[in-house]
Image (spheres, rainbow, N blue to C red):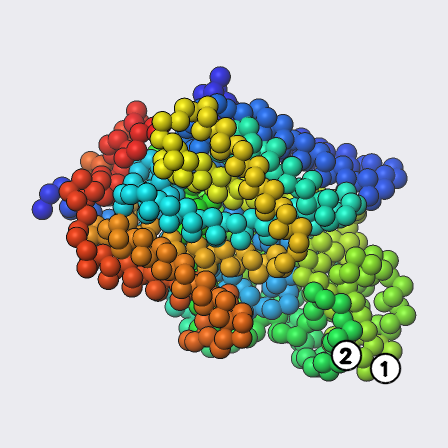
Amino acid sequence: MKGNFIDNLPKVYGIYTGGFIGFIIIMAIAEQMGMTAKAIGIAFVAFTVFIYALIGWLSRTAQADAYYVAGRQVPTVFNGMATAADWMSGASFVAMAGGIYFKGYGYMALLVGWTGGYVLVASLLAPYLRKFGCYTVPDFIGTRYGGNLARFSAVVVLTVASFTYVTAQINATGTIASVALDIPFQYAVYVGLISILLCSMLGGMRGVTWTQVAQYIVLIIAYLLPVFWISNKMGAGFFPHFMLADEVARIGELEQQFGFVKNAAADLKSVPKGLAGITKAHSAVNATPWAFISLALAMMMGTASLPHVMMRYFTTPSVKAARKSVGWSLFFIFLLYSSAPMLATLSKLSLIDPNLPTGIIGKTFAEVEAIDWYQNWNQANLMFISDFNGNGTLELNEFFMGGKAVVLATPEIAGLPYVISGLVAAGGMAAAMSTADGLILAIANAISHDVYYKIIDPKAETAKRLLVARVLLVVIGFAGATIAAMEIQGILGSVIWAFDFAMSGLFFPLVLGVWWKRANRQGAIAGMLGGLAAGAWYLIWVRTGGSGFLGITQLTFGIFGSAVSLVLMVVVSLMTAEPDKATQKMVDDVRVPSGKSILGRSH
Amino acid sequence: MSNQQKHWEKTRGLLFITLAIWFVFSIGIFLFGAEMNEVTGPFGYPWTYWFTCQGSLGAFVILIFWFANRQEKIDEEFGFSEREDE
């Protein structure tokens, strides 16, 4: 039956995709027949979450290798989809197009960084860690370097990085659930959390894998359909990616015409928190090479160090499949990332071009305030206008918007039916849930496998291990939700920090573990703990008014952390004895795809 | 040199080539971002803008598949590819 399921995957997900498109059509018909916008929103979120929960329940398991690595039988392309969903968070889905809209080139370093990192994953790490046969990332560190302290240090870095990340994801599920279901955020966070746990609790990695594939399908349809539809409706071109050059140029022209007028500080005080105006050129290079490159580099190295991504490649049937699977992952990510700038372009042009019926710049305030969508999004605290210069017409510097509005509001502005907005909510929910699932599982697995089983109680039976893993899953989920409910950091800020923490502590210990035979336990421990401490210190220093150096900001502190990590690791390794023969043999074995994996199938 | 050493030598060579191409698309071209953006590139977009939207991203996708194929060939050449039953 199991083998059957794997063979039937294309059919199963084909039917699923068809079913989902059918559902969208039914909702569209229901909308024409008078179903309210609110009911459509609830239907979309409830229906998709129900499907994920069903998949989670069908994937329940009592076996360790199914729970930790989905039985190592996930085919290349499907693992690519699952990784893409795992990877693309609520931030990618909801906030990325907004970031591009407001910050332009300087922000697009993230696009380059979040894709380029996969080259490092494919060439430096994934195939080798797959050959190793580990269940978790600390499992590799612990076995390669030996000793409980090395293993534990890796768990510490993993937990710091992933936990920073997961609160942002639970926050995003809460935001979407609160809007779509119309309940207060404090409760919505826990609704989001329960949806997340339904996917992962019973089936572990197996459940998460098959729900993530389902979530990818929902999120990519939800992102691409509006982009293509809006582009066609605006007459910008039927395939926006290849056809928006004129629109990009037109935005440049309009920016020249309007000029970027600086607002007085006193005026800006009246703008609600979190909203911003257009102050940077859309397609011009507005960052120094180092500002761009350092951010891209930090995101690339962070990508290669984030355990929830790396562990996806432990689930492929072979080393060969792991490599190819990285390519497929990036392909599926590329579909969304290359569309985000197009959405930002369409959104901006539709708002600022006076020649378009949707353009609001140059209209009178009375006209703009009478528009339905403006009223809706103004009420949702995502749009704001104010007549600073008192001339009665809206200028470019008098219009403010929240970053999320680019994805959430553009369909409505372009006059698409509400069914599309419901679909977008379901897509955002899928993106945030899938990433949160991957992260919570990464933390819970590391603590249950590496701390509980490998360090505390090596004789524990499978049933007990899996019970501990599930209890931890719930505990970590609730801890994340509790912190998310406090709303400390914005979604994107904490996401970027997670990359910096991960690269500070894990990048070099992982890479050198494969590529430098001489790397030893002492060096790795110094690298992990020293790198993490240095990165954290730099972040705190800059946050508390420190000036920083070399242009390293609070978004790129990982560059400093990982540099310290590299130096410490090399120096300490060379000062202490080289690894024993058995370890060196282990490294040799990891470097070739053939032969048995280092750790047994079930360990 | 043993078979395994030769295999690793070639693997490392491939890594360096892969990282060099990666460097060009992720870092190299952005050293000249301002200059390059003056020139009209693919589909009429300014060059640097196009790279950040699509060019570099697409190059990475192609690069990974190319790398995976080359590495498979190296593994086969030295008899280190996996057997189906493993």
User: Residue farthest to the top?
Assistant: A1
Kind of residue at badge 1: Asn
- Residue ID at (55%, 42%): A476
Q: Which residue is mark 1?
A: A391
Q: How many marks?
A: 2
Q: How busy is the neighbourhood of tag 1: few (under 14 within 10 Å), some, or many (20 plus)?
A: few
Q: Nearer the viewer, residue A353 or A493?
A: A493
- Numbered badge on residue A235: none
Q: Position of residue A351 (x, y in %)?
A: 75, 65
The answer for how far apart the CA atoms under marks 1 and 2 are is 15 Å
Q: For the point 41% across and 58% down, which residue is it? A: A532
> Circle 1 marks a residue in which chain?
A
Identify whether A413 is placed above or below A432.
below
The residue shown at (50%, 28%) is A467
Q: Earlier in the sequence, mark 1 or mark 2?
A: 2
> Eyeballing the image, is A449 above or below A122?
above
Name the secondary structure under disc 1: loop
Relative height, residue A345 to residue A415 (above, below): below
To which quarter of the image does residue A460 belong?
top left
Return the x and y of residue A40 as percentages of the image width and height: 79, 40
Which mark, by number, is residue A267? 2
Closest to the camera, between mark 1 and mark 2, is: 2
Q: Amino acid at mark 2?
A: Asp
Residue A3 point in image, percent of width and height: 45, 21
Q: Would you say the residues marked 1 and 2 are in contact, meaning their CB atoms lie under 8 Å apart?
A: no
Q: Is residue A217 left or right of residue A262?
A: left
Q: Dot 2: what SS? A: helix
Farthest front residue? A456
In the rendered structure, the answer to whether residue A186 lies left or right of residue A77 reads right
Name the residue nearer the viewer: A303 or A463.
A463
Can you tell which quarter of the image residue A388 is in? bottom right
